[in-house]
Amino acid sequence: QVQLVESGGGLVQPGGSLRLSCVASGSIFSIYAMSWYRQAPGEQRELVATITNGGTTTYTASVKGRFTISTDNAKNTVYLRMDSLKPEDTAVYYCNADIVVRPPTVIDYWGQGTQVTVSS
């Protein structure tokens, strides 16, 4: 069994910052990639940022230059540092990980989500 647990969401004013964390635990052989997605009310879930086990990062255009994804591989943890937050960043943020439990099978896991609200 593998679990992803997010933390760090909350209410922040426009222009503020938050850091989300997601810890993967359980029967993990290795982690191929970790990502953050978000879903606003009435919208489809969208990919925000991804980091591979080689350290390659990608971002959706709307967050480039404002958000930073990083990992602590020793702790199986991924972070999302969010700066210059805007009201349109308001959403439930989900952690996603492509995990090898037993080679060569890669399984996609999701966290439960954490609410981020940007409002004055």
Image: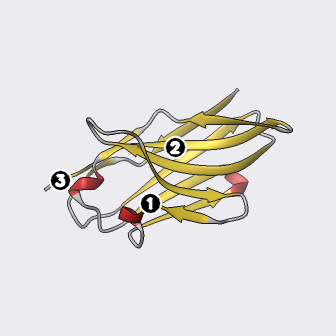
- Residue 9 placement (x, y as % from top left): 37, 47
Badge 2 vs badge 3, beta-carbon distance below 8 Å: no
Q: Is residue 69 left or right of residue 30?
A: left
| Vertical order, 65 against 74 (above or below) | below
Q: Determine the CA span between mark 1 and mark 3.
A: 22 Å
Q: Can you say which quadrant of the picture contains the N terminus?
A: top right
Q: Residue under label 3, please give it.
A: 119
- Residue 56 placement (x, y as % from top left): 65, 66
| Vertical order, 18 against 97 (above or below) | below
The secondary element bearing badge 2 is classed as strand
Q: Residue 60 appears in which quarter of the rendering? A: bottom left
Which residue is located at x 86 percent, y 38 percent? 103
Type of amino acid at the residue the image marks with label 2: Cys
Badge 2 vs badge 1, beta-carbon distance below 8 Å: no
Q: Residue under label 1, please give it.
A: 60
* Precedes in sequence: disc 2 or disc 1: 1
- Nearer mark to the viewer, of 1 and 3: 1
Q: Is residue 114 left or right of residue 16?
A: right
Q: Can you say which quadrant of the picture contains the C terminus?
A: bottom left
Q: Determine the CA span between mark 2 and mark 3.
A: 23 Å
- Nearer mark to the viewer, of 2 and 1: 1
In the image, 37 versus 111, the foreground residue is 37
Q: Is the residue marked by circle 1 packed among few (<14), some (14-19), or many (20+) residues within 10 Å? A: few
Work out whether residue 57 can be spotted: yes
- Residue 15 placement (x, y as % from top left): 24, 67
Q: Residue under label 2, please give it.
A: 95
* Precedes in sequence: disc 2 or disc 3: 2
Q: Is residue 12 left or right of residue 113?
A: left
- Residue 58 placement (x, y as % from top left): 54, 63
* Precedes in sequence: disc 1 or disc 3: 1
Work out whether residue 12 can be spotted: no
Q: Determine the CA span between mark 2 and mark 1.
A: 15 Å
